[in-house]
Amino acid sequence: MTSKILIATDGSEITEKAVDEGLSLAKKLGAQAILLTVTERWSAFEIARASRATNPIAQYEELAAKHATGILEAAGAKAKAAGIIYDAIHKADATPAEAIVGEAERRGVDMIVMASNNRKGLDKMLVGSQTLKVLALTDKPVLVYR
């Protein structure tokens, strides 16, 4: 039986599809939804480039937190409208795949729902696929929307 589903979102159009479908599945199964968004770490290069600001790290963290709050409020409103019990989580300063798998383990979820942005070629090699990393790091079922 599936009682908890972790739904990962970054607020993009493709992850909104995963949120909608994940919430639909949670409703059908009577499962709790764990809504998760992740804010990645700054690289040293980005910090150096933005060092003209008074405190670039604090500025980034503040903007990232506001953005994450907006993402989770929108997803939470959908869950609430559907009558689904949910929890909304923002993992800051983390790599998405590791945060998704770590939170899934910590929360004891039965399934992970996420989207794949279908990167190709050099972009995929440079950026990597968080979906592939999640699949490699977890033994839980992962439902991927494209």
Image (cartoon, rainbow, N blue to C red):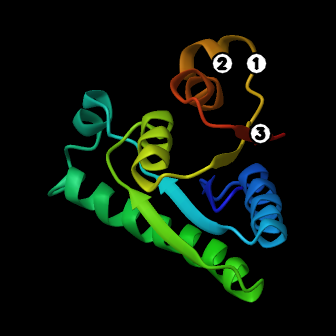
Q: Earlier in the sequence, mark 1 or mark 3?
A: 1
Q: Residues within 10 Å of mark 2 (few under 14, many from 20)?
A: few
Crowding near pointer 3: few (<14 within 10 Å), some, many (20+)?
some
CB within 8 Å, label 2 to label 1: yes
Determine which residue is flagged by label 2: 124
Quarter-of-image position of residue 40? top left
Task: Give the label, 2 or 3, closer to the camera.
Answer: 3
**Which residue is nearer to you in this view: 32 or 14?**
32
In the rendered structure, the answer to whether residue 56 lies left or right of residue 30 reads left
The answer to which of 144 and 141 lies nearer the viewer is 141
Three-letter residue code for mark 3: Val
Residue 140 percent coordinates (x, y): 61, 36
Label 3 secondary element: strand
| Distance between mark 1 and mark 3 Cα atoms | 17 Å
Query: Mark 3 and mark 1 in contact (Cβ < 8 Å)?
Result: no
The reply to whether the C-beta atoms of the residues labelled 2 and 3 are less than 8 Å apart is no
Residue pointed to by mark 3: 144
Residue at coordinates 25% horizontally, 38% vertically from top-left?
47
In this rendering, the label closer to the viewer, 1 or 3? 3
What is the spatial separation of the Cα atoms under label 2 and label 1, in whole angstroms?
A: 5 Å
Q: Residue at x 69, y 79 (%)?
A: 84
The circle on residue 120 is 1
